[in-house]
Image (tube, helix red, strand yellow):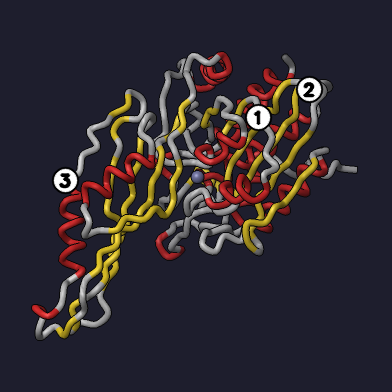
């Protein structure tokens, strides 16, 4: 009789996950989480599904080891960003393979990474002796601001320390040692409504917002980091007005800031509130600090050793610019060294006709296994 998990390869599992729609919003990560739970339970793992909201579970899978060493931890997310099916040349839920690429929403960000991690830890589970626990954390609702992982850390408080953390976000298998921070804010301006035929009787909140926007365009943090580059600021949304013939008494601007290591988000928030002055009320919507691991850390060097033959060159210290769950998981896991390493193409994330190279999914699976094997057998 065939063993239960024999039907899965890194590619077939990627394709199956692509067929399970986890577009966020609304997310619906339950089917994907349950599938992975069944596969890992058959491989000996203990799996918990911890709901963030109805139909939206985070997944934690663990397999104890024999030694005292801190756990080997992998992490990823199950949700994807939305897609406009009419603009895709392949079905975004189809997992079609063509010319060595698998297509679908989440092919790069990051169902391929999740599949590679699951297949790698199943193999690690069959090692005769393992000096530490193996743990996999898969979050729901990551794309809207690490909501699922935040929920896991704050509500469930079940996270023990980890020895090391590998995040499978898309890096084209290049090991990255940090990610930028993120600060999402809304800026509110208030005014006094009036009939638009007598604007002098009112106070126009849109004019105040417009002045704030122009000032934000000129704002310069004047901070750069050798690996992360510059911090950035963008005005990304604007809402105001009720009807065409009324002076608006409210306006709201959305602001996206990406911070670099060494820049505290709460300091940045204060800096911007000061800069915009009392006409504008700033509120924080979501906040994730930047993350950086020392490239001289022996475990990072070991990952460079493993990846050098796969990449054809020895990796050098680099960071990713997008935020990840690492920002919220790090503290709960006791600040372990973290490396971002995933088969997806960073340039394909959130794009129409998103794909991942099949060869990179296989290479990532081998890399996760080898990095894990070295951790577990020492
Ligand atoms: Zn992602």
For the view shown, which residue lies furthest in the right direction? 1
Q: Quadrant of the N terminus?
A: top right
Q: Residue 73 falls in which quadrant of the image?
A: top right
Does mark 3 have its CB less than 8 Å from ligand 1?
no
**Residue 210 in the image, given as x and y percentages of width and height:** 17, 61
Given residues 247 and 257, the one toward you in this image is 247
In the depicted view, which residue is nearer to us: 90 or 294? 294
The image quarter containing residue 19 is bottom right
> Dot 2 lies on which element?
loop
Residue at image mark 3: 218
Q: Which mark is residue 162?
A: 1
77 or 92, nearer to the observer: 77
Query: Residue 135: x and y, percent?
Result: 70, 35
The answer to whether residue 78 is seen in the rendering is no
Which residue is at 20% across, 44% downward?
219
Going from the N terminus, do you reach mark 1 or mark 3 first? Answer: 1
Q: Give the mark nearer the N terminus: 2 vs 3.
A: 2
Of callouts 2 and 1, which one flags the residue occurring earlier in the amino acid sequence?
A: 2
Disc 3 residue crowd, few under 14, some 14–19, many 20+, Cα 10 Å:
few
Mark 2 or mark 3, whichever is nearer to me: 3
Q: Residue at x 33, y 49 (%)?
A: 256
Image spot of residue 202 (x, y percent): 15, 77
Q: Which residue does the numbered mark 2 point to in the structure image?
A: 130
């Amino acid at each position: 009789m065939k063993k239960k998990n024999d039907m899965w390869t890194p590619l077939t599992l990627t394709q199956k996950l692509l067929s399970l729609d986890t577009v966020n919003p609304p997310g619906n990560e339950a089917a994907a989480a349950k599938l992975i739970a069944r596969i890992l339970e058959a491989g000996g793992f203990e799996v918990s599904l911890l709901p963030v909201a109805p139909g939206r579970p985070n997944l934690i899978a663990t397999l104890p080891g024999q030694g005292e060493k801190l756990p080997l931890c992998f992490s990823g997310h199950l949700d994807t960003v939305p897609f406009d099916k009419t603009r895709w040349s392949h079905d975004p839920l189809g997992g079609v393979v063509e010319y060595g690429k698998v297509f679908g929403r989440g092919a790069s960000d990051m169902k391929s990474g999740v599949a590679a991690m699951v297949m790698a830890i199943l193999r690690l589970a069959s090692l005769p002796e393992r000096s530490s626990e193996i743990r996999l954390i898969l979050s729901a609702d990551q794309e809207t601001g690490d909501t699922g992982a935040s929920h896991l850390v704050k509500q469930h408080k079940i996270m023990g320390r980890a020895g090391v953390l590998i995040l499978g976000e898309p890096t084209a298998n290049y090991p990255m040692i940090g990610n930028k921070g993120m600060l999402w804010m809304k800026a509110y301006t208030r005014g006094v409504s009036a009939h638009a035929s007598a604007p002098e009787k009112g106070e126009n909140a849109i004019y105040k917002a417009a002045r704030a926007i122009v000032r934000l365009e000129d704002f310069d943090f004047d901070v750069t980091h050798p690996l992360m580059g510059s911090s950035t600021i963008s005005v990304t949304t604007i809402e105001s007005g009720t009807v065409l013939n009324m002076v608006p008494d409210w306006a709201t601007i959305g602001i996206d800031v990406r911070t670099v290591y060494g820049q505290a988000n709460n300091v940045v928030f204060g800096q911007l509130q000061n800069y915009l002055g009392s006409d504008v009320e700033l509120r924080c919507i979501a906040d994730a600090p930047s993350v950086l691991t020392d490239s001289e850390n022996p475990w990072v060097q070991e990952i460079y050793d493993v990846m050098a033959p796969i990449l054809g060159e020895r990796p050098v210290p680099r960071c990713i610019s997008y935020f990840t769950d690492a920002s919220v998981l790090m503290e709960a896991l006791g600040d372990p060294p973290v490396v971002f390493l995933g088969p997806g193409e960073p340039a394909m994330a959130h794009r129409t006709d998103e794909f991942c190279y099949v060869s990179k999914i296989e290479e990532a699976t081998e890399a996760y296994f080898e990095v894990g094997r070295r951790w577990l057998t020492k």
